[in-house]
Image (cartoon, coloured by chain):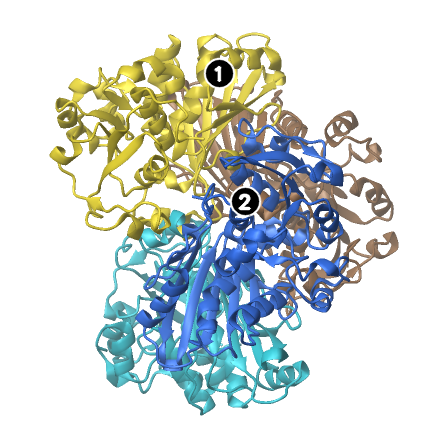
Chain colours: A cyan, B blue, C yellow, D brown
Amino acid sequence: MSAVSVSIVGASGYSGAELVRILARHPNVTIQTLFANTSAGKRLDDVYPWFRGLVDKSFEPFTIEAASQSDLVFVALPSGEAMSIVPDLLARGTRVIDLGGDFRLKDPSLYARYYSQTHASPQHLAGAVYGLPELNRKSIAGAQLVANPGCYPTGAILPLYPLVKDGAVNPAGITISSLSGVSGAGRKASVDLSFVEVNETVKAYRIGTHQHIPEIQTVLSHSSGKPVAPTFVPHLIPITRGIYTSIFANLASDYSVADIQKMYDRYYGSEPFVRFTTPSAPEIRNVVYSNFIDIGFHLYPENNQLIILSTIDNLVKGAAGQAVQNMNIMCGFQETEGLK
Amino acid sequence: MSAVSVSIVGASGYSGAELVRILARHPNVTIQTLFANTSAGKRLDDVYPWFRGLVDKSFEPFTIEAASQSDLVFVALPSGEAMSIVPDLLARGTRVIDLGGDFRLKDPSLYARYYSQTHASPQHLAGAVYGLPELNRKSIAGAQLVANPGCYPTGAILPLYPLVKDGAVNPAGITISSLSGVSGAGRKASVDLSFVEVNETVKAYRIGTHQHIPEIQTVLSHSSGKPVAPTFVPHLIPITRGIYTSIFANLASDYSVADIQKMYDRYYGSEPFVRFTTPSAPEIRNVVYSNFIDIGFHLYPENNQLIILSTIDNLVKGAAGQAVQNMNIMCGFQETEGLK
Amino acid sequence: MSAVSVSIVGASGYSGAELVRILARHPNVTIQTLFANTSAGKRLDDVYPWFRGLVDKSFEPFTIEAASQSDLVFVALPSGEAMSIVPDLLARGTRVIDLGGDFRLKDPSLYARYYSQTHASPQHLAGAVYGLPELNRKSIAGAQLVANPGCYPTGAILPLYPLVKDGAVNPAGITISSLSGVSGAGRKASVDLSFVEVNETVKAYRIGTHQHIPEIQTVLSHSSGKPVAPTFVPHLIPITRGIYTSIFANLASDYSVADIQKMYDRYYGSEPFVRFTTPSAPEIRNVVYSNFIDIGFHLYPENNQLIILSTIDNLVKGAAGQAVQNMNIMCGFQETEGLK
Amino acid sequence: MSAVSVSIVGASGYSGAELVRILARHPNVTIQTLFANTSAGKRLDDVYPWFRGLVDKSFEPFTIEAASQSDLVFVALPSGEAMSIVPDLLARGTRVIDLGGDFRLKDPSLYARYYSQTHASPQHLAGAVYGLPELNRKSIAGAQLVANPGCYPTGAILPLYPLVKDGAVNPAGITISSLSGVSGAGRKASVDLSFVEVNETVKAYRIGTHQHIPEIQTVLSHSSGKPVAPTFVPHLIPITRGIYTSIFANLASDYSVADIQKMYDRYYGSEPFVRFTTPSAPEIRNVVYSNFIDIGFHLYPENNQLIILSTIDNLVKGAAGQAVQNMNIMCGFQETEGLK
């Protein structure tokens, strides 16, 4: 297996730095160039000093020529910026994994509504493969453009997909309450993200308008073949990494814990990054810095409900780790390479 | 208005100390005795040094004789301990506010099921008044025994009561997802509550078995006159104080935000400790160290749902502050005295 | 005692909001106007929602005419901004308490060096009174302009002053290592102050260049009559409020713990906001939201050293609380009014 | 290089679990047995669920027979427990790395004084090698018993050793102020370590009596050949992992930053786990989960002082990582194996 050369566009953000952390230990990868905007010219270990002595690279200004010299490019830009450079990369034959939201939705009108801007390259939406390996492994393998899933959708879709697909829960009336660590908001100067404003508090936000709502809805509906439009409420909590997803669904008929576990095992029994915790509840600390999603579930027979809980590290399974998992699939490497 | 003399049983726990903090500034109250078990003999400011120079008292071993010399006794013991001393206090004519769970349920079999022990004085359950002033102000005024509400129930019942009572939401299918700071678990030596185990993580716990489930259910059902049995999932989060309650309910018919607000205003418009935040979501930091409950709500028309969010300080409106509010009502003081 | 009317310039920052919190409960004060720049036009409780239902005011744009209508003006602007408006206030006879650093140093060349700008009104430096009540109570009473001390200097000067003045410790070779919560940096959008960058880490900063170095040095030297130039190293730690100051000094001769305590008691025995914790060490949580400074000390006889530890809330005794204490002295109110 | 088999005694504590985390990825190591007391019989991933799917082992009760079947045994017991089992392991020819404090001091009377108990096997003190690779690499290679350094001493000795040895700083008058995360106190049920008691506060502790005082003193004195007895003050801060060490020393003569850096480079220039940050200050987050020690220093010419700052992860370079580094040296593996 020969090495692939990769570059990262937007390498100075949290997801970009996490990609470097993972890729630097990957035996089949050479990191070619780290592209950044405002940090161009700075050393990686000036912005993230933990790389000192480990990764000796500097940020460089993005050019399409330089980027397209890599076999594969990770785009870790804020949503809205990828769609203007990805078409050029694709045109030059470069494979792309976009960690932002620009190519996750098939319908440009949904993009316009939830991302508050017109999509700049709608012609690539149809061909982009949604990079959730547990659902789309085969398509990912042959894709030129992979849309890496959002952090919240990863934590919500994986636990729900088998249940909806198999008809174990009612597709209507599903509610998702998610708690996110602050790194999910990215690295930026903002009073709202400052320590004093976030510490020792909790706040729900963007109820009914969050850009991950159509992503959860369309992916679940498409993959299960049933219309699913869960209620989604995200909350910001004072931790650095991690997402806790609590899902409430109505059982379609009588199921035991063993039934549900069996169903999950049928779908995910050989998945390398899906773990089950029942009868315990999952905890964020058990997945931090790992590519695992931990899933626990509880019957609530009084109300004929199933409560499903999941945890991921938003920067790993929710971003950079899943991107590397996708790269491994695209390049024919062992899927867990660099991730365990 | 002459001063009342009060004592606190279990004064060395977090709720007990919070009672001291509030009562020490109350113009109509004299704190007579602080009773404690293992801390008996120690100074208050040895256990809680912030009282140094402010409150000059020591903990004393509990005796029924000493306690019954106060006009009113706050019992801040772990659930299961109050029920063996309260009958004696009542027999001697002392008024009692119990901050634990021993007198909140009317049905001793529910107590046995959720508190894992037989109730020791079931004869006092019928007479105990549930101390949620916004629902039971008149009964509280004349009560000899007030059962101060649990922290989670306070955050859940207050937002739900008007909606259920007025039929704005369907009494079936209500889901409550609550996040609690660690002080809610009390002051005790436990690996599970240690900083390293709690910091930077989240964990759901006691799903379907938490002792506040029957309290929420019976109080809501009784006060609204409709059977209500919400699903309740508590989570532990890494903050010291505060509870965030996210409630998901199905709207009974078409309501606007203004309709809902009007309904709330009819119930709580003149309540001194209920605030509304819509269209913003409430935040825990806005109620910390205060007796307020902040309530925000959002229509989720896609799913015909109403999302209601509330925040309280679990040690104040969820415990000691509400207890003082009850005391103010019982003693004829201004209801906000010592609390603003 | 008639009420004084006060206004706050820079009321939307953390110190400004803390002033509102304290002054709103002060029986002798009427808050006239809250001045702010970028927040002008907003309601106080939009920026700080905990004031909802408690303080009903909006921020207004600053004018010298409006400000000078108050008896006393608190200036809570970033250092460098006060010096251009204070002269006008003084000229109109208004009394001023400046919470920033513009009037703390007597020597404009020190100001230029440590604040990186030329002082705009050096003619007022001589007349400004350094507002540390425990040292300068009498001068404060009659002052028109009080320079409220910095947070680090408050935590360092108060423990050191009696020791240096009495010759108990060698004025040379004193080292101060301070730990500050993040609110000390003010309310601003900055990657360096974001939750992710500050949480779960510690960093020393501005070693040898911090603007509080000359303040500590000149106040201690002037008040003790001996040249004192301590080494000062500040560190940022992941808490919201509080400063922990650890001071290392060489004992001038043999002293017992009782000797040192006696010396402190001679200076601070009747001070309302100075507490001693020896033999325990002080803790930040014991002073949070209070105007106390807690001081503990330990002999280290192996090295003939005295270790002195102090804790304050940087926003209270280190800023707004001390400012109100100064106002109480200036206005002839009881010194603890509104502060206990 | 054939694999060595290792076992861990006290594997259920934080240092033990960290050893498992590191050793599980070490290519030359087979983990044979995890010994624990109260957790014996439980699965590793019941106590530490992040190992689920990664390490499939259970805790077993300790027996000398079972332990001595490994080539090398890590003892991660609380201080005071190792000294009763290590002699038996040594007698059977097993190599031992003790992560506790039982074999770090040569003088049993110092042990008695600072550990409050009589040493049970003083005959092994002379032969134990102090496992700080940067100082004792050669002796470690041939040792049968390695005393792994304490966390605070690692952070203090490494920065100080070259300075004292070369006479750059005065051996008298050195002051060490250290800040430790809570995992340094171990995994135990204790009110003092509970989240509520530790969060949002700081406290100095065990001033003049901490058991690491004689360790720092004797190792520095012995290795430098000069009597050194620094003042040491540890503080507990609200982070999970990491130690920040701030050291204040008097320069012996005129040195520039370049001089000091050159001196450090002479000692540590080829050390794989020592990094320098000057002119920046080190930060804890840059070393968390790594075996690095980051060192920064600053001249304070006004007082002829050198300020040296260091950061380590107390569980890695301060415990398990350094133990594996020692194992690598003892077994002839590459010193960084499993640690980068």
Q: Is residue B40 above or below residue B135?
A: above
Provide the residue designation for mark 1. Answer: C270
Is the residue under label 1 in contact with that under label 2 (CB below 8 Å)?
A: no
Classify 10 Å Cα crowding around label 1: few (below 14), some (14-19), many (20 and above): few
A229 and B241: which one is in front? B241
Please state if D289 lies on the left or on the right of A141 as rendered.
Answer: right
Check disc 1 and give the amino acid type: Ser
Residue drawn at (34%, 38%) of the image: C24
Label 1 secondary element: loop
Please state if C136 lies on the left or on the right of B162 as rendered.
Answer: left
Q: Pinpoint the chain carrying mark 1.
A: C
Q: Is residue C217 above or below residue B59?
A: above
Give coordinates of residue A275: x percent, y percent. Answer: 60, 73
Label 2 secondary element: helix
Q: Is residue A2 visible?
A: no
A185 and B290: which one is in front? B290
Q: Nearer the viewer, mark 2 or mark 1?
A: 2
Check disc 2 and give the amino acid type: Cys
Residue C30's image quarter? top left
Give coordinates of residue B127: x percent, y percent. Answer: 66, 59
Total labels drawn: 2
Residue drawn at (47%, 68%) of the image: B160
> For the residues marked 2 and 1, what is the alpha-carbon distance in whole angstroms?
37 Å
Q: Which mark is residue B331?
A: 2
Give the quarter of the figure containing the C terminus of chain A.
bottom right
Give coordinates of residue A248: x percent, y percent. Answer: 52, 76
Give coordinates of residue C232: x percent, y percent. Answer: 41, 26
